[in-house]
Structure formats: structure tokens, C-alpha cells
Image (tube, rainbow, N blue to C red):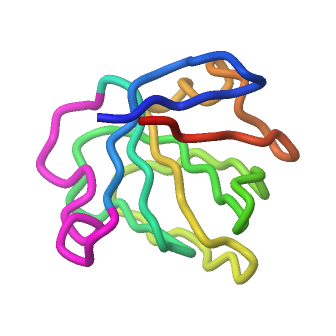
């Protein structure tokens, strides 16, 4: 388990999905998530088979937030060419954690 850091504040636990298998599985089959999941590398996500609404943040190679969106189950997200990572949380969590476009985030062990 790692920690999501925003503006030098530890804000939530984060699971890192760095293998193809872990990225493919993502949040599928879960009822929710405590904290966040970082998919790396990733440029887009889908919510086909998901059971809950999620917030999605696309991050560049330096972990700066490019965009934030909310996705209902059964959707295909847009491909963000400049993205290198995707951060997923339960809907409403990103705003509460202070994650918005332009914000620099960090993942610490």
C-alpha cells in the first residue's frame, strides 16, 4: 500500500496497479474503494462491469493532473494522449482530496 500526497499532505491510501493484469482488473467487481487506485501506465479507462460511479484523473508523466471527470458504470472514457497515469476514486472523492486540473500529486510508499 502506498499513500496519495497532494500539496505535501498525505490525503488517502492508494493502490498501484502497475502490471497489465492489475490494470485490466482495476476496480471491477468491487463495491467501492477506500482511497484511490493508480493505473500506471494508462491513458484511458472504462467502467464496463463497474458497480459504482468513479472519479477519474488523468496525469502526465510528472504526475500533474491534466483532467478530472466522473464516470458512471458502463462507459468508455476518452483517451488522453498526454496522460501517462490514471487515478481512480469513488465519485466525489477527488474534489474532497484537493485533486483538480493543474495540481501536482505524488505517490509515496
Vertical side of 91 occupied by 27: above or below: below
Total tally of numbered discs in the picture: 0
- Kindly report the secondary structure that dominates the magenta region of the rendered protein: loop
Quarter of the picture containing the N terminus is top left
Quarter of the picture containing the C terminus is top left
Which residue range is magenta in the image? Answer: 18-33
Apparent side of residue 13 relative to residue 96 in the rendered image (left or right): left
Q: Quadrant of residue 100?
A: top right
Apparent side of residue 62 relative to residue 14 in the rendered image (left or right): right
The residue lying furthest to the left in this view is: 29
Q: Which residue is painted at 53% across and 69% down in the image?
A: 77
Q: Nearer the viewer, residue 35 or 77?
A: 35
Q: Which residue is painted at 35% across and 60% down in the image?
A: 47
Q: Which residue is painted at 52% across and 72% down in the image?
A: 44
- Report x, y in % for residue 66: 78, 58
- Report x, y in % for residue 39: 42, 60
- Report x, y in % for residue 5: 61, 28
- Report x, y in % for residue 75: 42, 65
Amino acid at each position: 500500500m502506498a499513500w496519495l500526497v497532494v500539496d505535501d499532505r498525505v490525503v488517502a491510501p492508494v493502490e498501484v496497479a502497475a502490471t497489465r493484469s492489475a490494470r485490466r482488473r482495476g476496480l471491477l467487481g468491487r463495491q467501492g474503494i477506500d482511497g484511490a487506485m493508480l493505473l500506471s501506465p494508462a491513458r484511458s479507462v472504462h467502467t464496463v462491469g463497474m458497480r459504482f460511479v468513479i472519479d477519474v484523473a488523468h496525469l502526465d508523466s510528472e504526475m500533474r493532473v491534466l483532467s478530472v471527470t466522473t464516470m458512471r458504470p458502463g462507459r468508455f472514457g476518452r483517451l488522453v494522449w498526454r496522460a501517462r497515469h490514471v487515478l481512480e476514486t469513488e465519485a466525489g472523492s477527488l474534489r474532497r482530496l484537493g485533486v483538480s486540473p493543474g495540481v501536482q500529486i505524488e505517490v509515496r510508499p
